[in-house]
Image (cartoon, helix red, strand yellow):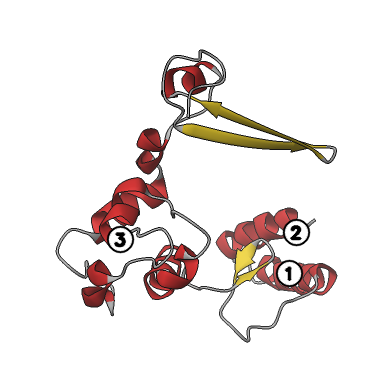
């Protein structure tokens, strides 16, 4: 497929925009996409996840349990391998989430400490989610006690946490 902007090079970037239920699809070459400020796939792995995925490939397993089998995992739909996932830093299709589920869960657990997202913070599964008002009241009480006992370091920490909540 040719680039829709210059009509000369092969389109390698396929951009779909949806604005007010109006779908627009553009097929661009790498140069025209760069001119519009759209990064090609070659530039993506330089982010934190791409770097982390790249380090997963060094020394099979790279400290992650169960990763010894990961280099042999391949997506049945698009054919992406674990090595390609490490190199690109992104998945090839929607079915890759299932094909690479175990390595991705281990990656998320290592990056965030959990695989369950609860609001703005990751919490272990089953952890109680506190209401902001109840949490603020508890922090105020702990702050009062810290000031009374002249534990100013703890008081400063509690004050900062209270400001984040409010």
Task: Say whether marks 2 and 1 touch (CB < 8 Å).
Answer: yes
Question: How far is disc 2 from disc 1 in space, using C-alphas?
Answer: 10 Å
Instruction: Identify residue for label 1.
Output: 139
Task: Identify the residue shown where x is 38% and y is 34%.
Answer: 43
Q: What secondary structure is marked by label 3?
A: loop
Would residue 108 be found to the left or right of residue 120 on screen?
left
Question: How far is disc 2 from disc 3 in space, using C-alphas?
Answer: 43 Å
Up/down of 121 relative to 15, above or below: below
> Which residue ends up furthest to the bottom in the rendered image?
126
> Which residue ends up furthest to the left in the rendered image?
59
- Which picture quadrant has residue 81? bottom left
Would residue 48 be found to the left or right of residue 137 on screen?
left
Of residues 135 and 156, the one nearer the viewer is 135
Would residue 108 be found to the left or right of residue 132 on screen?
left
Measured as percent of width and height from the top left, residue 110 is found at: 39, 68
Of residues 92 and 105, the one nearer the viewer is 92
Q: Residues within 10 Å of mark 3 (few under 14, many from 20)?
A: many
Q: Earlier in the sequence, mark 2 or mark 3?
A: 3
Measured as percent of width and height from the top left, residue 164 is found at: 71, 54
Q: Which of marks 2 and 1 is nearer the N terminus?
A: 1
Of residues 40 and 66, the one nearer the viewer is 40
Up/down of 72 relative to 89, above or below: below
Instruction: Identify residue for label 2.
Output: 165
Q: Which of marks 1 and 3 is nearer the N terminus?
A: 3
Q: How crowded is mark 2: few (under 14 residues within 10 Å), some or many (20 or more)?
A: few
Up/down of 128 relative to 134, above or below: below
Instruction: Identify residue for label 3.
Output: 81
Q: Nearer the viewer, mark 2 or mark 3?
A: 3
Of residues 62 and 75, the one nearer the viewer is 75
Q: Which of marks 1 and 3 is in front?
A: 3
Measured as percent of width and height from the top left, residue 10 is found at: 42, 25
């Amino acid at each position: 497929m040719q680039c829709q902007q210059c009509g000369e090079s092969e389109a390698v970037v396929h951009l779909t925009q949806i604005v007010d239920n109006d779908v627009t699809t553009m097929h661009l070459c790498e140069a025209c996409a760069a001119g519009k400020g759209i990064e090609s796939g070659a530039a993506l792995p330089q982010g934190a996840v791409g770097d982390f995925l790249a380090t997963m490939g060094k020394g099979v397993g790279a400290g992650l349990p169960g990763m010894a089998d990961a280099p042999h995992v391949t997506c049945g739909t698009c054919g992406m391998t674990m090595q390609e996932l490490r190199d690109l830093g992104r998945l090839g299709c929607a079915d890759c989430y299932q094909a690479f589920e175990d390595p991705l869960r281990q990656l998320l657990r290592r990056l965030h400490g959990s695989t369950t997202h609860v609001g703005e913070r990751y919490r272990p599964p089953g952890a109680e989610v506190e209401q902001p008002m109840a949490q603020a009241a508890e922090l105020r009480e702990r702050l009062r006690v810290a000031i009374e006992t002249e534990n100013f370091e703890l008081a400063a920490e509690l004050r900062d946490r209270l400001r984040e909540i409010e």
